[in-house]
Image: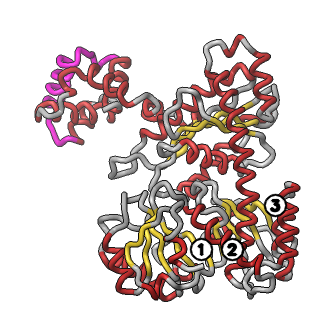
């Protein structure tokens, strides 16, 4: 199959941005999808390169595009297929770099998935193989027949992977999830520690199984040792694994429907009065009809599947626990919620769910670094009827996580907050919606809320220092380099403008909370 053959397919809708006859008649031996800045070490000669251009931003200089294309040329790539979705088009600087290096570049419209391109290439190549059974660079016909039968029988991923590489001498091989969780391994492959597995996902010997899955749901074929086999054969093995993965995703989609029904019952005002219906919904999701349970809510981009995929992948790291991931009927776009079966009531409080997920969160976030991922975790709900309260806790903790600010920035960092973390007044207030916090601060501070007034800013600073030093006139004066009488005067002004008496503890707490809500 040649590059020009792809342009003739109306179903793909590709557009040629640059490429002459010599480039368009190059033969395609395989496909690799990548968004690395320097993908050269992952590529094989003759491959078609698919990129969503996540690695590039309009602020980048010309040299960045130059380095990317130079890596393609050095690796012997036949063409670059650049997605239009990330930037609304293909940057001209990238087109010019391809022209200089003699790499054909085609644009992929938003409605065409990378999977469609990959399927087109390999289906065409497999069709060629059926007419040339002895052709090199392909899985033997008997191997393909066996793998097709195993797929149809719904075999487990360990068996499928082992049989797929058996004709290569059964080298050590793994199927890894996006966060490095071992989905399958051959008998010759030793257990892979979590940290090394997460690193292996981006190793040179790793091949993406399903590039069109969300960043959190992708699987990867990892061979830690070099294997003397044509790249096209490895791509065909990856495609077999992708078919198994797609079947898994279909089952997950069905399960999410049942989870959505469960969450609707939990969130409904009458859920407490329908224990039988709640028990049936829990059972349908594979959960026990007796607690304890933990609820977690996650918010990502405005993409329901992305948040659900992230949450599903995270919860697979909790061994021996059932869970149901779905979406609340009135949830915000990009929000997903899960009910997790925790351990027995006696050790539910020591169940390391929050610890495990917090340790995993940076790795999970790194799989889609440009989209902040936040989550909130409830305390254990001891009975099904307590799930509504746990859901309220999880959503409150989610709001707290989204309200936190990274030092020196305006944007909230990706974060996971548990209700048990909210042990200070400041932490507690972060769970209150921003508009409610703003309204409280404005009304509690009265005229002082207008910090455009220099006098008011001065009084707010004095109030903040006064409360920080537990109402000590002397320490406040020392911290502000003022006379004690000046501090007395300013605090009297604060009391007059706010209507509060700072000799009273409750009024001090009101104004402290108001300052924290600003």
Specify whether 321 is left or right of 465. right
Q: Are marks 2 and 1 in contact (CB under 8 Å)?
A: yes
In the picture as drawn, the residue positioned furthest to the left comes out as 454
Q: Are marks 1 and 3 in contact (CB under 8 Å)?
A: no
Which of the numbered marks, if any, corresponds to residue 31? 1
Gap between marks 3 and 2 measured at Cα: 17 Å
- Dividing the picture into quadrants, the one containing residue 69 is bottom left
Which of the numbered marks, if any, corresponds to residue 394? none
Q: Position of residue 243 (x, y in %)?
A: 73, 59
Q: Secondary structure at mark 2?
A: helix
The earlier-in-sequence mark between 3 and 2 is 3
Is label 1 or label 3 in front?
A: 1
Residue drawn at x 67%, y 61% as measured from the top left = 219
The earlier-in-sequence mark between 1 and 3 is 1
Look at the picture and state if 101 lies above or below 334: below
Gap between marks 1 and 3 measured at Cα: 23 Å
Is label 3 or label 2 in front?
A: 2
Q: Is residue 350 in sight in this rendering?
A: no
- Dividing the picture into quadrants, the one containing residue 264 is top right
Residue tagged 2: 235
Q: Secondary structure at mark 3?
A: helix
- Dividing the picture into quadrants, the one containing residue 174 is bottom right
Q: Position of residue 456 (x, y in %)?
A: 15, 30
Q: Nearer the viewer, residue 93 or 412?
A: 93
Residue tagged 3: 157
Mark 1: few/some/many CA within 10 Å (<14, 14-19, 20+): many
Main SS, magenta region, reads helix
Q: Nearer the viewer, residue 26 or 226?
A: 26
**Magenta-tinted stretch:** 480-504
């Amino acid at each position: 199959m040649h590059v020009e053959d792809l342009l003739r397919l109306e179903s793909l809708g590709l557009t040629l941005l640059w490429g002459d006859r010599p480039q368009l008649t190059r033969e395609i031996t395989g496909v690799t999808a990548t968004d690395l800045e320097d993908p050269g070490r992952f590529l094989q000669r003759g491959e078609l390169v698919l990129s969503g251009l996540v690695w590039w931003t309009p602020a980048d200089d010309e040299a960045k595009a130059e380095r990317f294309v130079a890596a393609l040329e050095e690796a012997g790539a036949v063409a670059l297929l650049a997605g239009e979705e990330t930037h609304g088009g293909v940057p001209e600087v990238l087109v010019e770099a391809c022209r200089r290096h003699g790499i054909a570049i085609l644009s992929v419209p938003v409605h065409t998935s990378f999977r469609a391109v990959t399927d087109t290439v390999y289906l065409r190549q497999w069709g060629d193989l059926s007419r040339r059974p002895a052709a090199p660079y392909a899985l033997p016909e008997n191997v393909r027949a066996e793998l097709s039968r195993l797929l149809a029988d719904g075999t487990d991923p360990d068996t499928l992977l082992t049989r797929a590489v058996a004709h290569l001498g059964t080298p050590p091989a793994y199927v890894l999830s996006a966060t490095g969780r071992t989905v399958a391994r051959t008998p010759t492959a030793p257990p892979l520690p979590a940290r090394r597995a997460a690193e292996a996902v981006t190793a040179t010997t790793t091949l993406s199984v399903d590039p069109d899955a969300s960043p959190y749901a992708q699987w990867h074929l990892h061979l830690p040792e070099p294997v003397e086999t044509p790249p096209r054969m490895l791509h065909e093995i990856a495609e077999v694994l992708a078919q198994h993965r797609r079947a898994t995703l279909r089952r997950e989609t069905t399960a999410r429907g049942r989870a959505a029904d469960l969450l609707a019952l939990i969130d409904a005002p009458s859920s407490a009065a329908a224990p039988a219906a709640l028990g049936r919904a829990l059972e349908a999701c594979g959960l026990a009809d007796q607690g304890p349970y933990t609820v977690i809510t996650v918010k990502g981009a405005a993409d329901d599947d992305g948040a659900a995929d992230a949450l599903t992948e995270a919860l697979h790291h909790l061994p021996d626990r059932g869970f149901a991931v779905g979406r609340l009927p009135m949830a915000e776009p990009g929000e997903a919620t899960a009910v997790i079966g925790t351990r027995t009531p006696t050790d539910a409080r020591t169940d390391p769910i929050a610890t495990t997920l917090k340790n995993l969160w940076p790795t999970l976030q790194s799989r889609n670094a440009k989209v902040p991922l936040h989550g909130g975790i409830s305390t254990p709900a001891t009975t099904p009827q307590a799930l509504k309260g746990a859901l309220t806790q999880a959503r409150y903790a989610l709001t707290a996580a989204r309200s936190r600010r990274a030092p020196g920035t305006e944007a909230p960092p990706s974060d996971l907050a548990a209700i048990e973390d909210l042990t200070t007044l400041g932490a507690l207030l972060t769970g209150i919606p921003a508009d409610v916090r703003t309204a409280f601060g404005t009304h509690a501070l009265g005229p002082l809320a207008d910090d455009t007034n220099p006098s008011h800013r001065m009084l707010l600073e004095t109030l903040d220092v006064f409360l920080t030093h537990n109402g000590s006139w002397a320490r406040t004066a020392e911290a502000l380099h003022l006379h004690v009488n000046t501090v007395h005067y300013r605090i009297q002004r604060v009391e007059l403008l706010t209507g509060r008496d700072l000799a009273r503890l409750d009024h001090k707490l009101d104004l402290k909370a108001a300052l924290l809500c600003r």
